[in-house]
Amino acid sequence: MLFRQLFEPLSSTYTYLLGCERTGQAVLIDPVITMIERDLGEVHRLGLTLAWSVDTHIHADHITAARELKQRAGSRIAAPAPDRLPCADLGLEEGRPFEVGSVQLHPLHTPGHTDGHFAYRQDDRVFTGDALLIDGCGRTDFQNGDADALYRSVREKLFTLPGETLVYPAHDYQGRRVSSVAQEQGRNPRLGGDRTLEEFRAIMAGLNLPYPKFIDYAVPGNRQCGVCPDDVPEDLREYCGPMAQSPQG
Ligand code: FE
């Protein structure tokens, strides 16, 4: 399998490119609309054809490239089934492996950051989305977030994978790229060690995070698989990509 971890700096998002060397088919996990040229360039440079894009959840901090990729590269859109997106070509469900050539993704429903959130295990890696970050986790105060659900998702579904499983998160704000289940189990300050549900609830309730500045545009845009809404204010236009930044529109 060909594998690349790609970074998007505005929202500190990691996009993952997985390619099947036998069929030449590729899948992008959590592609970002601003990075579409870079990502398609990487797919082509590796001699692959983009067959699918997959999102871990409905993002609040960036616009998915799923729809643009479908238009530009003819890829299909897979998304968590619980989100019931009419624009998706396939709704992913736990227990039903998703195959792109010989690359097999095993969807794991991991609610808590959002209610429809999925992680994807692939061989000895797991793409954890915002359910589990390196030494952290996604916030639980929007999009039907639920600290109790996130605690269970991480402790019962992700931490029960083999310890050597590599953890690839959807974000890192400090340049860290990869962790492992054993490392997060051992030292994740929110969810690792013997942290109790009560302690986790208190940590999440006490974060006092600011209102997510792009959420009111990203969520409706991502419910359409990646449309930049017309009413995005000037200071947030860069989230919509280079074309949208042009004063000519
Ligand atoms: Fe998120």
Image: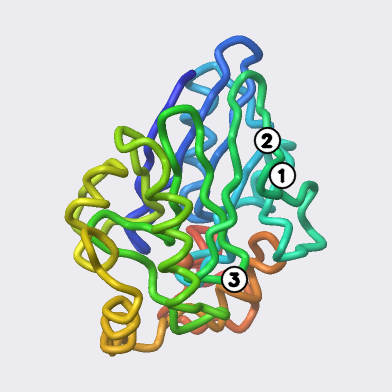
The residues tagged by marks 3 and 2 sit, at their Cα atoms, a distance apart of: 20 Å
Q: 147 above or below 17? A: below
Of the residues tagged 2 and 1, which is closer to the observer?
2
Task: Name the colouring of the figure.
Answer: rainbow
Q: 101 above or below 64? A: above
Amino acid, disc 1: Lys
Residue located at (41% from left, 53% from top): 170
Q: Quadrant of the C terminus?
A: bottom right
Residue located at (46% from left, 49% from top): 35
x, y percentage for residue 13? 38, 55
Circle 3/circle 2 CB separation < 8 Å = no
Task: Determine the image quadrant of residue 199.
Answer: bottom left
Q: Residues within 10 Å of mark 3 (few under 14, many from 20)?
A: many
Q: 108 above or below 18? A: below
Amino acid, disc 2: Phe
- Residue that carries the numbered disc 2 in the rendered image: 98
- At numbered mark 1, what does the secondary structure look like: helix, strand or loop? helix
Q: Residues within 10 Å of mark 1 (few under 14, many from 20)?
A: some
**Left or right of 172: which side holds 50?**
right
Residue located at (30% from left, 33% from top): 164
Question: Which of the marked residues, 3 or 1, is nearer the chain's N terminus?
Answer: 1
- At numbered mark 3, what does the secondary structure look like: helix, strand or loop? loop
- Residue that carries the numbered disc 3 in the rendered image: 115
